[in-house]
Image: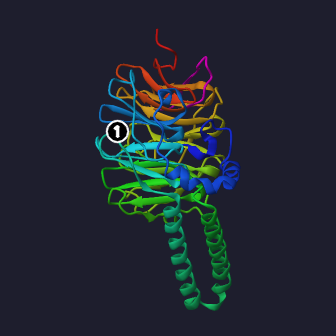
Amino acid sequence: MANRFMCETLGTACVGLSMALAAPAAFALPDILETPARTTLLAPKSLLNDATRAGERIVAVGERGHIIFSDDEAQTWTQSSVPVALTLNAVDFGSEQHGWAVGHSGVVLHSSDRGENWSLQLTGIEASGLAIESKEEQIAEMEERIEQAPEEEKADLEWALDDLHFTLENMQADLDVGPVNPFLDVWFEDDSHGFVVGAYGMILRTQDGGETWKDWAPKLDNPQSFHINSITQVTGGALVAVGEAGQIHASVDGGDTWERRESPYTGSLFGVMGTGQVNEVIAFGLRGNMFRSTDLGRSWTVVPNEGGATLNNGAVADDGRITLVGNGGAVLMSTNAGESFRVTFRNDREGLMAVVPLAGTNLLLVGEGGVVISDARGRNPN
């Protein structure tokens, strides 16, 4: 699951500002794309943005291209071999062997050995090329529609064509600067079929394990190209993606088609997850706003959150406990499928980006301070 070139890392900065700051340094990006992550004993203590399981192994990703893994329930960690020194935002495994990690400059990394070694599969330059090609196809289709449309419909279609040309010009200008747009999340169903999502509405799909990718943005109702921050599969098989401006998209056919749901919130949603029950969804984000749906996003109820901290990530344990984590050391725990949560703030107040349930009732928390093991409420175990 997600963040985050948005410096959603700690939920306090916006993508626009980050990208504006990144642009002057764009000429250094090719060097970073060719510079392997350095081996350091401090990797488990540095900023980590996401963590997940690859079978019994736990794999976490973070700043400077750090990827670490543990085979003993987070007691000890080994650093992986990674070909880039860029911040990585999210990681997911389609099977125990095959995993993907995504991050800044539009990088997509792949591992076929449970996360020990990684190879560069895609860069932002290639991703931008796919998006530009897709936009050019849309323009050609719109021009054909205008030619065949009744005279009274042509004016509106020509306005739409102008918007497409404007967007294409912006894409081409961005590509001239360099691969600065980040991927923010990744989800794989198996070793072949998966999606990566990111800033400015980016969404790519692969059906061959990342050997080839296709721009999938035209499949989503997101004309303003708002950031897509998180994508997941919920119990029952549906896919849900959320992002900036409260956008919520759902697919019931493996991502072939998407429907935009009416959102209960107009602010940024940074994460989405299932509850373990069929078609139940929890979406959460800025300032602790949290919403629950039992019908795949067709209707929503507000979940009270007295903590008010921005929420970044969540997980469901085997026993049904749901844990969400966020800024300021916030750890929220639910034992009733997300209808209500108990909030704890860790004493160190360091921002938390992801959580993985461990054996028993303990949790692995990752974030600003690296890896931490806590009890079910987020407190340090005795």
Q: Is residue 61 visible?
A: yes
**Left of 88 or right of it: where is 80?**
left
Tell me if residue 90 is in the magenta stretch.
no
Question: What residue occupies the far top of the structure in this picture?
Answer: 382
At mark 1, the secondary structure is: loop
Tell me if residue 346 is in the magenta stretch.
yes
Region of the chain picked out in magenta, as a range: 338-352
Q: Is residue 298 visible?
A: no
Judging from the image, the colouring scheme is rainbow
Provide residue 179's location: percent of width, then percent of height.
57, 58
Where is mark 1, residue-wise? 116
Above or below residue 352? Residue 200 is: below
Residue at 60 percent of width and 90 percent of height:
150
Provide residue 192's location: percent of width, then percent of height.
31, 55
In which image quadrant can residue 276 be found?
Answer: top left
**Left of 112 or right of it: where is 49?**
right
Residue at 32 percent of width and 27 percent of height:
71
